[in-house]
Image (cartoon, rainbow, N blue to C red):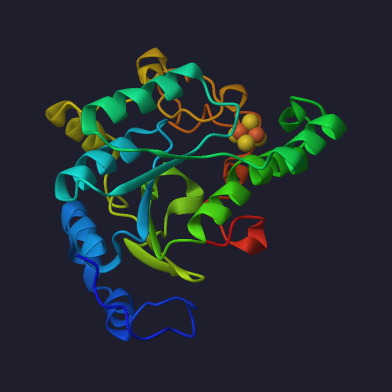
Amino acid sequence: MTAALSHTSRETGNSLNSSILEEIRSGRLENLAAEEILTWALGNFHPRMSLSCSFGNPEGLVLLHMLTRLEPGARVYMLDTGRLPQETHDLVDRVRDRYGVEVEVVFPEAEPVQKMVRQHGQNLFYESLEKRKLCCRLRKVEPNRRYLAQLDAHVTGLRREQNVTRTDVAKVEIEGRLVKVNPLVDWSREDVMKYVRENGVPVNRLHQRGFPTVGCAPCTRAIEPGEDIRAGRWWWENPEDKECGLHVGEEQGGSGI
Ligand code: SF4
């Protein structure tokens, strides 16, 4: 299924060929539906492509459902930060049983996390934006960067309406040496939940208890009716700061991927 990736791109530094680059830059992929985008991505990048699934957002599970129907050997990974709620771990096992997929669980490096906790305490993220970002960097961004170094492409469940930081995300983007595939960018929350219901997609049990999105336990809380769906994530911070660094550039302290 993998396309012949013959020419190395000077811009991306990997084996992307020029016709794939041209197709991405043309904007034609913006007209494709989510499953068509995934079919295109599998055809070009599998098995050097993996779905980033947090198991805390229904978007990742919708994509997992679509991907494994298109390609049973599709790769899926999650970041285990060491601070996830039990409901998220339970969902990983439910998904393994239901889809027969081997979820690649990625852990942070022990030494820098131990040093951070020794210096700043277990709950440093509540003390300042700088310390919260340090924790996200060591527990999420750096393990993610290490994992992605072996790939040519990754798939995310980003949607434009999720946050003020995500309004201009394209369906397929080139970031550094990687292709980032975002098939659900133009879906609404209602579209996602309708797909979940109609296809019996397993989702995190905390959604039923007022958590529309689930991240690390100490940084996620339930929301009140009418609140923005990301209001429960890092609720003590301003909306423009609410990114863990996985989806912003290096100049903003992110992964640059
Ligand atoms: S979400 Fe909170 S606990 Fe998780 S990595 Fe970021 S700051 Fe640390």
Image side of residue 73 versus residue 85, left or right? left
Image side of residue 248 versus residue 44, left or right? right
- Residue extending farthest to the right is 119
Residue 27 screen position, x and y as percent:
28, 73
Ligand 1 shown in quarter: top right
Q: Is residue 65 visible?
A: yes
Residue 213 found in image quarter: top left
Residue visible at 54% across and 20% down in the picture: 221
Residue 227 screen position, x and y as percent:
45, 26
Residue visible at 44% across and 23% down in the picture: 89
Up the image or down, 47 lies above or below 52; here it is below
Identify the image quadrant of the N terminus: bottom left
Q: Is residue 129 visible?
A: no
Up the image or down, 167 lies above or below 77; here it is below
Residue 23 screen position, x and y as percent:
26, 78
Residue visible at 30% across and 65% down in the picture: 45
Up the image or down, 163 lies above or below 100; here it is below
Residue 84 screen position, x and y as percent:
54, 26
- Residue extending farthest to the top is 209
* Foreground pick, 181 / 233: 181
